Amino acid sequence: MKIDFMKIRDTFLGYCLVNSVTHADKVKEITGKTPDGLYEIQFIVNGVELPLEETFEDINQQIERMVKEKALELLKEKFSEMEDIMAQITEELKRKAEEKLGIEIQEW
């Protein structure tokens, strides 16, 4: 399959292409660029050629899902920490108010 790098440069497939060209240059192999400026790319796993665009779209979706799940997990942790801090601040304010006013505050 021929691929225009400019159309995929900000994708996981683009990263893989750059990485493959970098490695090919290190070992003095052909970079895969054709005379029309496109790259001939095959994605072979265990001897089976996989449909390139569909496979990498699936990979992109999985990565996006995993990143969102991790972001949500981190946000929940931070909000939990913030809730704890707010509870401590509230308790301290209540204690100081009771101390200053000389009364016991039932509901806060």
Image: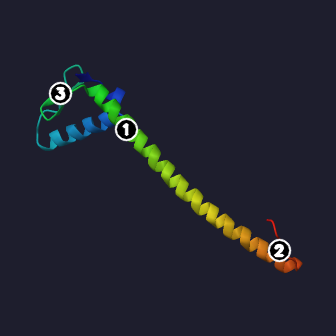
Which residue was labeled with disc 1?
62
Residue drawn at (62%, 65%), measured in percent from left and top?
84
Q: Nearer the viewer, residue 107 or 12?
A: 107
Q: Quadrant of residue 22?
A: top left
- Between circles 3 and 2, the one closer to the viewer is 2
Q: Is residue 21 above or below residue 85?
A: above
Left or right: 92 in relation to 47: right
Q: Amino acid at mark 1?
A: Gln
Q: Amino acid at mark 3?
A: Glu
Which residue was labeled with disc 2?
97
Of callouts 1 and 2, which one flags the residue occurring earlier in the amino acid sequence?
1
- Position in image of residue 50 (x %, y %): 21, 28
Q: Is residue 39 above or below residue 23?
A: above
Q: Quadrant of residue 100?
A: bottom right
SS type, badge 1: helix
Q: Nearer the viewer, residue 29 or 77?
A: 77
How far, Cα to Cα, is label 1 from label 3?
Answer: 20 Å
How far, Cα to Cα, is label 3 from label 2?
Answer: 72 Å
Of callouts 1 and 3, which one flags the residue occurring earlier in the amino acid sequence?
3
User: Can residue 107 be seen in the rendering of this structure?
Assistant: yes
Q: Amino acid at mark 2?
A: Ala
Q: Quadrant of residue 97?
A: bottom right
> Which disc, if any, is residue 19?
none
Of callouts 3 and 2, which one flags the residue occurring earlier in the amino acid sequence?
3
The quadrant of the image that shows the C terminus is bottom right
Dot 1 alpha-carbon crowd within 10 angstroms: few under 14, some 14 to 19, many 20 or more: few
> Which disc, if any, is residue 49?
3
